[in-house]
Image: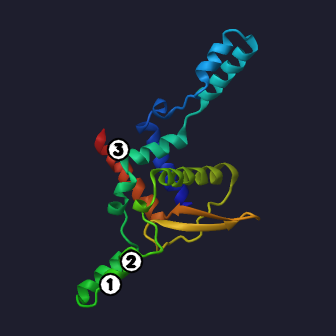
Amino acid sequence: MAYLLIVSAIESVAQHAIKRDKVRKVHPNEDAWSSRAQHDQEFSQLLKAYREARGQNQYLKERYVEFINTFAPASDWEKVVSHPLQDLADYVRDISPTHGMDHVVEKHWFEKYPADLSNKEIGTILSDSYTHRSCFIHRGEQPPHREPTSFNRFFQEFLDYDGTAIIKQLLPNYDLLFGIAQCSIRNWMDSI
């Protein structure tokens, strides 16, 4: 439920911040279709129906992803999200400076950080977070997140077996989504 509320908050603001035409997609063959429609009445009707259907698309997922990329880009996520054990490490450092716990909050070999991922991978992770929210709302499907609290700073790794292969998916953890929501909405408000 918490993931749903965070994604929904971002989506609501994204609809105001990112205009539909900014992310609207035009099929690469549409010019050729227009030429054909001039000489073919049935094809013209089909093209008209396609354009009407496309006009109903609000591009909510695309606006959501664009909003995050604009107002809370992945390059800022390390500033936005602290390590889940950072408070403990700071406390130990305060009471015993010689016995610090900085090694606990440093990046470990098994952790993924935003800098380790390509822009395409980041886009997929964000897009998938919106899809999980939509599937939960419209179909009642549970999102794949398994642990409410993650000890990894940014992501949860989800493994599933589809009957033929193991599916590996990187999911934003709660702290990352919450940080993205705070940062993106605040940055958007500062920009208006």
The residue beneath circle 2 is: 85
Does residue 72 lie above or below 88 as drawn? above
The residue beneath circle 3 is: 188
Mark 1 or 2, which is nearer the eye?
Answer: 1
Which residue type does callout 2 highlight? Leu
Q: Residue at x 50, y 54 (%)?
A: 121
- Quarter of the image with the C terminus in it: top left
**Label placed on residue 101:** 1
The location of residue 97, given as percent across then percent down, is 22, 88
The location of residue 56, given as percent across then percent down, is 61, 29
- Determine the secondary structure under disc 1: loop
In the picture, residue 1 is in which quadrant?
A: bottom right
Q: Are marks 1 and 2 in contact (CB under 8 Å)?
A: yes
Which residue type does callout 3 highlight? Trp
- Determine the secondary structure under disc 2: loop
52 relative position to 3: left or right: right
Q: Earlier in the sequence, mark 1 or mark 3?
A: 1
146 relative position to 71: left or right: right
Query: What is the distance, in whole Å, between disc 2 and disc 3 at their CAs?
Result: 29 Å
In the picture, residue 53 is in which quadrant?
A: top right
- Determine the secondary structure under disc 3: helix
The location of residue 125, given as percent across then percent down, is 52, 55
Residue extending farthest top: 39
Q: Earlier in the sequence, mark 2 or mark 3?
A: 2
